[in-house]
Image (tube, grey):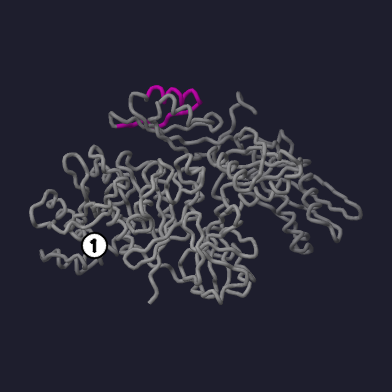
Amino acid sequence: MSQPVRNIAILAHVDAGKTTLSERILFTAGEVRRPGRVEEGLATMDYLPEEKDRGITIESGVAHFEWKDTWFNFIDTPGHVDFGAEVDTALTAVEGAILVVSAASGVETQTVAAFKKLREAGVRTILFVNKLDNPDYSLDETLINIEEVLGVRPVLMTLPEYRDGKMTGVLDVLSKSRLEHSATGEEVVDEGWNVDDGWDQAHDLKKHYAEAVEFASNFDDEILKLAMEGKPVPAKILLRGLKALAASDDYALCYAGSAMEGFGVRSLTTALTFFLPEVPAFDKGELGQVIRLRYFKGVGEISIFRSHTDLERKAWPAGFEFSRLKANLLVPVDEIRSGDIYAMRTPFETELGEILKVTPEGRSDPIPQSDQGERPHASLRDKYQPLLQTRVECLGSEDFLHVDKSLNMLGRMDPSFRVQKDDGGFWYLHTVGEVQLDVLLSRLKREFGCEVKAGCPEVRWQERLCREVGPVENSFQLGPHKISIKLSATPLEGDAHDIRLSAEFLETAPREILAGVRSALLESAEVGILGKGALVGVRFEVHEFTWTEGALPPMIKKACADAVTKLIKPADVELYEPIMELSLECPVNFAGLVTGDIQSRDGKVKEIGGDGKTHFLKADVPLRKIFGYATGVRSISKGTALYSMKLLGYRPIPASFRP
């Protein structure tokens, strides 16, 4: 029987201790000799220079370890909002996840967002309450906060133990044992401790075991029968009930401890072997799916790949190579196993989300995204709305092709980042936020060797059509070839685009002509009319389209783009600006300064709260007013404020501000 495989992700709000916990899990499993510290730039999973400099995770790092005869692939995901696409792609390839909640801050904005992602993806989730090495942080308050905000009942499976105000161990509810540190810093069972010997906190341990029995009895008839008869429920039977409970949306198994001090991690790691589902059954004939794309200097493009089959090296498709990936290290393998995750090199470019078949070439008749049913990658690029655009140009014209290729590679790697090439010989980079932009420019230089000049980032507005326009006619001729189009446009509600082609055009035009027209009109909408953002909520109707045999795709693009420019004038367009929802907390003594600063940025405070020590607020703020907010709020709060932002929506730009 082959070794079981489990793929797991770890998610959290920024600074909740997610990467530190990742390091501790690898240390517990014996995969690293000592856990690297994020603040020292030594985290195993954070290998990019940008990650070490900023102390945040940017790429979903991949490592592996063995525990209790189970093979784990471990994906450490970013917590920063600019890199949410990394989280989404990671969740397409995992059976379970750990959601870290900081006892210092409770359930925060990104904690809620991460939990929502996990629920939507159907990923089984285990909670870890972190930072309990500080006895001033309350486990009970955090559990109440989890239940109130996340809407699940946490079932506590470990309890922190304190002596003289210092955390000295944890008590494991299921095994009724105490875990302490060995001389080498590993968590080990205290063989001299017995729950029935009257030790401190033994009563609490028994209470939580009884609670676990009560909750599990809702999912297991034998546990219910034993509980009703007043008989003890053995751990082996309770484990079975907790497995069923873990699959419920109403409960969540919760482990408590300290990632920094290494308490509670062993019990959590063991829980991953008990409570996560098996890898799914895949369709026969599928080689596997591309879940991420990476570029390693000196190696080239790498596909992070989840195998859908068992295959030895001799049966691999021609030109394929598979390796184990640990952060940025590649270790060749001689076989691949179904459900396992590898780094893959192929003789051709792969696409994010693409499913490859088991053939000698590996890619004959790849399965189109449109035919992949509920495969989550299909609409991932549409999910993220770029909010900034930045003009980038080469320092020398001889570098144009290299920069163009490198930018396209970065765009393929990150579904939330888009590149728009201008006919003037420069590019617009469309990014979710400023941090993402800074990282992309840094990687463009370091990994691809591209020297570019970048302008200041600008807000990417939305352009909306105010009225129905057209039809207009436009022609473009190059030598003997000529293309003519008759086009009109109508406003639509929402942000969607609709392209309608005349019946005659649909019946007579070959597929490549139809695809070329659709692509050209969509590209024109993406560029916009004023150059300030995409034109959204518009229906293009092609009344007539004629072409000469042999007309090239660039001619179609030129004819359609000129027709759109001729059809829609600046006066036909209204600008909308992005509005961000800002969630912020800080010590109460900075509340007035922070609130006043937000109001000076045209922010509208809509919610205020706190507990007497910490001040909390939510506000709607125009994106154009909060460039560089991290520096400003750090200054006025002396580095104590924590905040996060998400796109709330778009609204018409005030008449007093027209760019």
The segment highlighted magenta reads 591-610
Q: Is residue 267 magenta?
A: no
Q: Is residue 594 magenta?
A: yes
Q: Secondary structure at mark 1?
A: loop
Residue under label 1, please give it: 218
| 21 shown above or below 630 | below
Residue 197, image x and y in percent? 8, 55
Position of 337 compared to 462: left or right?
A: left
Residue 635, image x and y in percent? 44, 25
Q: Give me the residue at 66% from left, 41% from top.
A: 451
Position of 528 compared to 34: left or right?
A: right
Dot 1 surroundings within 10 Å: few (below 14), some, or many (20 or more)? some
User: Looking at the image, which is closer to me, 213 or 68?
Assistant: 68
Residue 406, image x and y in percent? 65, 49
Q: Give me the residue at 21% from left, 67% from top.
A: 236
User: Looking at the image, which is closer to me, 540 or 220?
Assistant: 220
Residue 466, image x and y in percent? 66, 37
Q: Give me the residue at 40% from left, 74% from top.
A: 2
Position of 252 compared to 656: left or right?
A: left
When asked about the image quadrant of residue 111, the answer is: top left
